[in-house]
Image: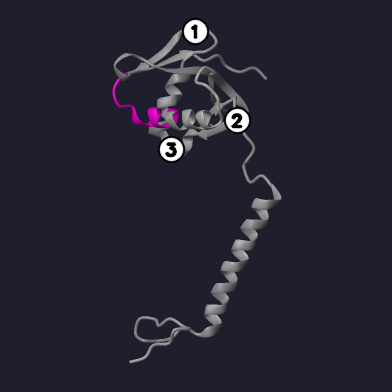
Amino acid sequence: MTQSLSRPNLPGGEVLPRGVLVAIGLLLLVSLIGAAVVRLSGISIREPDAAVVASRMLRFADGPEGSVIIMDATTGTQVARIVGEQGFLRGTMRAMARERRMAGIGAQPAFELVARADGRLTLIDPTNRERIDLESFGPTNSAVFAALLHDAKPSTP
C-alpha cells in the first residue's frame, strides 16, 4: 500500500485537493507577512490608556520569616505585610525584580500601581518602563493589588 507524500489523506482515504492545500498555504503566508509588517513597522497595536483615577508608589521588601513588606514610597508607611503564600503577588514581583536585575537596577526604586477610569489596573516600573496589566490575570488576582490602593490619593488632572 503506497501513500502520496505530497497530499495528506483525509479520514476515509480521500485526498485533499491541491487547490485547498495551495489556499491554506497562501493564507498562512499572508498571515505571516501581515504580522511581520506590523511588527517591523513599529505601529502600536495597544489601545491608549484611560485616565488615571488613583496611583500609589510602592516599595516591596523581604520581611522576617519570608514575609513581604509593602511600603508607601511617598509617606514611608507600611501598607501591607504579606505572610504566607500569596502566589500571584509574589510571582508578579519576582518577574519585575528579574527585569530590574537584568537591566542592572537595584531594588530601591519604587513601583507605581495605577488604577484607570476604565477599571484597568497596571503595575509600572518607572526605572525601565516595564508594565504588567494586572486585569489580564482575572478579578481575583488583580484584587490582590487593588487592595493596595485603598489609601491612595485620587489623581488630579
Q: Answer left or right for 155 relative to 85.
A: right
Q: Quadrant of the N terminus?
A: bottom left
| In contact (CB < 8 Å): disc 1 and disc 3 | no
Rendering colour mode? one colour
* Position of residue 38 measured from the top left corner of the image (x, y, whole percent): 66, 53
Q: Nearer the viewer, residue 23 or 49?
A: 23
In magenta segment, residue 7 = no
* Mark 2: few/some/many CA within 10 Å (<14, 14-19, 20+): few
139 in relation to 14, above or below: above
Residue annotated with mark 2: 129
Structural distance between the alpha carbons of marks 2 and 3: 20 Å
Q: Quadrant of the C terminus?
A: top right
Residue drawn at (64%, 62%) of the image: 33
* Position of residue 124 measured from the top left corner of the image (x, y, whole percent): 55, 28
Span colored in magenta? 83-93
Query: Would you say residue 73 is visible in this rendering?
Result: yes
Query: Would you say residue 122 is visible in this rendering?
Result: no
Image quarter of residue 112: top right
N-terminal of the pair, mark 2 or mark 3, is: 2
- The amino acid sitting under disc 2 is Arg
Q: Secondary structure at mark 2?
A: loop
* Mark 1: few/some/many CA within 10 Å (<14, 14-19, 20+): few
- The amino acid sitting under disc 3 is Phe
Residue annotated with mark 1: 76
Residue annotated with mark 3: 137
